[in-house]
Amino acid sequence: MTAAGASARTRSWWGWGWSDEMVPDAECAALASQLPGLPERPLPAPDVDDLQLPEPRLTPPASLAQVVSMLPLDRASHTYGKAYRDVVRALHGGVAAAPDAVAFPNTEADVVAMLDWAGSNNVAVVPYGAGSSVVGGVEYRGDTHAGVLSLDMSAMDGVLEVDTTSRAARIQAGTYGPAIEDQLRPHGYTLRHFPQSFEFSTLGGWLATRAGGHYATLYTHIDDLTESMRVVTPVGAGESWRLPGSGAGPSPDRMFLGSEGILGVITEAWVRLQDRPQHKASATVRFDDITDAMAAVRAVSQSGLHPANCRLLDPGEAALSGAAEGGESVLVLGVESAHHPVDSRLEELVTLAADHGGKPNERAAGEPDTAADAWRSAFLRMPYLRDGLARMSAIVETFETACTWDRIDALYQAVRADVGAAVEQVTGAPGMINCRFTHVYPDGPAPYFTVIAAAKRGQELAMWDDIKAAAMESLHRHRATITHHHAVGRDHRPGYDRQRPEPFATALRATKAALDPLGMLNPGVLIDPR
Amino acid sequence: MTAAGASARTRSWWGWGWSDEMVPDAECAALASQLPGLPERPLPAPDVDDLQLPEPRLTPPASLAQVVSMLPLDRASHTYGKAYRDVVRALHGGVAAAPDAVAFPNTEADVVAMLDWAGSNNVAVVPYGAGSSVVGGVEYRGDTHAGVLSLDMSAMDGVLEVDTTSRAARIQAGTYGPAIEDQLRPHGYTLRHFPQSFEFSTLGGWLATRAGGHYATLYTHIDDLTESMRVVTPVGAGESWRLPGSGAGPSPDRMFLGSEGILGVITEAWVRLQDRPQHKASATVRFDDITDAMAAVRAVSQSGLHPANCRLLDPGEAALSGAAEGGESVLVLGVESAHHPVDSRLEELVTLAADHGGKPNERAAGEPDTAADAWRSAFLRMPYLRDGLARMSAIVETFETACTWDRIDALYQAVRADVGAAVEQVTGAPGMINCRFTHVYPDGPAPYFTVIAAAKRGQELAMWDDIKAAAMESLHRHRATITHHHAVGRDHRPGYDRQRPEPFATALRATKAALDPLGMLNPGVLIDPR
């Protein structure tokens, strides 16, 4: 009945990932010792049995009872996503907004029945993949519904069909990242979509939020990997045709891609696969000057060489992850191919970076690239460390954006200055504001910022919200998007509302009213609830 | 005042392209001699002075009078697009559906004023780029409006800004293809978007119809080249931000891309540019067996080699264009790059094709590829030949689609059989049904069919409509898209209505009602008029 049932390991209900990866208390304290004024001991990991969950207000009909859970663990774990502010609230036991029930539909018929029942009973339905939202995307905030149902799609999982001729697969929306790859591997294929949340997110969640994968260029966004989608809306279900391309009207899929659960529930999709890469090579290049580094990345992005990885770490990010020290920026370059040797392409990329003042890492052939490895390990463990520091009442959160190349220098400086000032004003001490580029396009990069600062126990949320408001304001002033791949949810509404063109807002509201006339689906996300 | 005013050459008001490229009468007769039972002489090119244009029903206000024309030439030339059925109707003098007036706005304020005036007077507005629609996209069909205004955007033209850092340009919607390239060339850039209609189509038209360029893979669709768009709707104007990528809700641009003038008037866009290619190479490969040829193209499309050109001509198409004879299929491969030599990539592609039974053309280095050249010349002159044959009462028309690789063999055989049977039944004699692939994706190709047959003078339209209905039915049975890049317009409505998912149709109707509450914009395109 619970989502975690299939695995021997237990998922953390309040923090990131696996319970057994939780950072030990002593390490939490050691991590926090670098920040001034934090308490000596971490908050304990909260116990579900200690929570004051409100009484469930819903009584699902008998026909649905066996796919609906009201267990405290299920309700608690579906209260929030996995943003810093979610973790902090859970650490303090704040789960008053827990859903009344969690549904685990097994079939599309279950989904339809659930929506029908919810519609007849003024129940809000929050579609839920694996709950890794960091933007308040799966958390009900409101008081106009008679109850809240979290619709966890994880029981509708698995690769259903593989078309080896067209290199595509039909996959259920609730399938987690690792299961997708495990089931494609025997066919020699990969979806090759690896967001940082890969282990703890689903195909449906990726589609609903327009997820961005690990790769820096070309086919990395789930949008481009989507061949067709099936969606259940409150007024009926529909499926786009499997087509490699079509110019028949506006793309139906693009309307549901990024709709974040407000228009319908994605039940399955045909996705485009790729042959598994056989050739890989990577290198790192260091820069004394971040402006040179950015110019190098711009040249790479406009070179047509399409590196699989092109991740620029600014001096703070490089130092934090152990990839460099002494104020250097680090560019991690990677190339891969299923068909062709890639060494000459890597050489061209490194030369291009060197032409812009970069210093390639010297190492013998076959020797591991320690800077790249250091960064990669830090990358994967980062969310667990984040939770450890949150237990120490530190602020550790990220935000990300994208802008055109002509604005990146100004944006980088301004965001660091503005958010730095906000940290100092709010917490009384300076913090760390680091940046890396996660994706690069010929017309601009996607910078990803990390903020680390000491908060005061009990005031973490208020402090972070003020800092985040300053970040959103800074992004807006530079016309950088409120989100490149984290989505809008509820937390990004202020920035999103100012960013989207008014005719599109009008269209989205009209679409919402037509497909979800009762306004029951994920109220408050993307647009105001009815 | 007229769209053609800027050029010394004259545009044909009834047929394709330039008047001085019209095929001479003797060549028309010679072309037609290969088809049995056609008349001996071509219909004459129709003269505007002979047309019976209905009296214009509109009186634009004085403030707009100087940007509105009621000249017969303007009204006649804006009655139809350039489909075969448009040409036939014009040849027979049938322009009863001519717009009452043609507006040539100079500014966005003109567009707004025009929509305001039209809305207050129950006037239908048909947005018009350069009128190369082949799907009834610019032709009013109805009787519920007090008048019809064709909104020709060609006076709002020119590249307004070039951002050399981000490699992007702001371009007005009415700019023709050649003007775009001419104005980008001094900067060393190209938009590199070359649809077959390039000379006679505009950026706005490309955006409104999701145009596909000449290139077979990667960045060829205008969708992917769009950084931001500005759109004037009847309820207000809006502009998306210039962003290289964004995950903030469903893409606003993707809602207007392909909206075919029913939601608003696109006035300008920021588009992504590319460096001008410096390295080019091409080759042709012949195949005895079309099935082998398709398998070779599939391997190429899935190889990650991204050829700029990958055009497969089936035996009929290859013979017609002089690229091959004796039942061979021809694959035209091309590679190009702004930065890197491409010869080794071409070699890999040719080897891949040879592995699937292809016979590469033998030629010395530097020697021109005659098969590729023959095909390219035929390609560019084809629309003029089409008009010449139409004057001989032949049927010459194309339709195009896309499907996944698993269905292509069956689709190819079925379409040729079904349409062949329809031609024979309708005209009483067999016709030619040729096919080429214009674009290829890892998950499927975009086949483009040409139909050539003898009609009976005066019955051309009825005969073609029956054949086209059979083609649409055949595509639908194989779940191949009703259009890959020609758009839907009014002619493809039967296929489009069956293809699009019902929830999306609901959303599109709601969006239309919200943005164009009076239903004045391009009524009947994509959805039913109010």
Image (spheres, coloured by chain):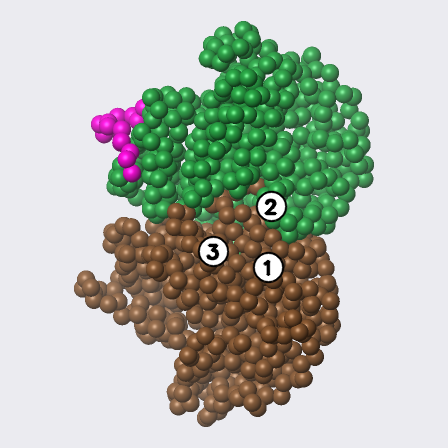
Chain colours: A brown, B green
Circle 1 or circle 3, nearest the eye: 3
Residue A16 picture location, percent across and down:
47, 77
Identify the element where label 1 is drawn. Answer: loop
Q: Which residue is mark 2?
A: B500
In the rendered structure, the residue with mark 1 lies on which chain?
A
* In magenta stretch: residue B365: yes
Q: What is the number of the mark on residue A259?
A: 1
Question: Marks 1 and 3, Cα distance to the nearest angstrom?
Answer: 20 Å
Q: Which residue sits furthest bottom?
A: A40
The image quadrant that residue B72 belongs to is: top right
Circle 2 or circle 1, nearest the eye: 2
Residue drawn where x is 73% and y is 19% of the image = B53
Question: Marks 2 and 3, Cα distance to the nearest angstrom?
Answer: 19 Å
In the rendered structure, the residue with mark 2 lies on which chain?
B
The kind of secondary structure the magenta stretch mainly shows is loop
The image quadrant that residue B13 belongs to is: top right
Type of the residue with mark 3: Arg
Q: Is residue A128 above or below residue B25?
A: below
Q: Look at the image and tell me in which quarter the C terminus of chain B lies.
A: top right
Type of the residue with mark 2: Arg
Q: Which residue is mark 3?
A: A170
Identify the element where label 2 is drawn. Answer: loop
Residue drawn where x is 65% and y is 71% of the image = A63
Q: Would residue B518 be seen by someone viewing this image from the given angle? A: yes
In the rendered view, does B325 fall on the left or right side of A465? Answer: left
